[in-house]
Image: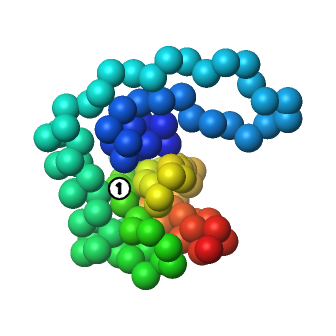
Amino acid sequence: MAAATAGVARGQWQQPTILTDPAPAAKAAPGPELNAGSAEALRTMMREVVTSGTGSALKDVPGEPVYGKTGTAEFDNNPANTHAWWVGWQGDIAFAVFVEKGGDSGASSVPVAEKFLRGLA
């Protein structure tokens, strides 16, 4: 999901850079350009999630603007079993947070993202 989110930010999917030693072999070729209008609409909506939506705890994180989307994944009818997630980017860093049985994303996955981003500052 972090790679998909980076594609929206960049306007084109590219294989992410994974920091390992030794470095991986050659990267995959970039994907086709995304539809510019669709990508821009997604960027606008993902920024609004931070400025006035469920990710608003991130609107004052230092550095470049943060973009993202919160969500939940239910696997049964028990609210206690709802997973929470957040995908987003800031500058050239894209990330995904998944909290197993995290419930509300604003209370679980967004604070993890906030701690990560503030640690980069």
Identified at 55% across, 18% down, the residue is: 28
Identified at 38% across, 42% down, the residue is: 10
- Report whether residue 1 is seen: no
The residue furthest bottom is 60
- Report whether residue 59 is seen: yes
Q: Is residue 48 left or right of residue 69?
A: left
Instruction: Choose top left, top right, bottom left or bottom right for residue 52.
Output: bottom left
- Where residue 33 appears, as percent x and y from the top left, is 29, 27
Mark 1, residue position: 69
Q: Is residue 94 left or right of residue 24?
A: left
- Where residue 76 appears, as percent x and y from the top left, is 40, 41
Q: Is residue 33 left or right of residue 17?
A: left
Count neighbours of disc 1 (C-alpha within 10 A) and say few if under 14, some if 14 to 19, many if 20 or more.
many
Q: Is residue 83 above or below residue 66?
A: above
Q: Quadrant of the C terminus?
A: bottom right
Q: Secondary structure at mark 1?
A: strand
Amino acid marked by disc 1: Lys
Q: Is residue 49 above or below residue 29?
A: below
- Where residue 12 appears, as percent x and y from the top left, is 36, 32
- Where residue 46 appears, as percent x and y from the top left, is 29, 57
Q: Nearer the viewer, residue 96 or 5?
A: 5
Q: Nearer the viewer, residue 10 or 70?
A: 10
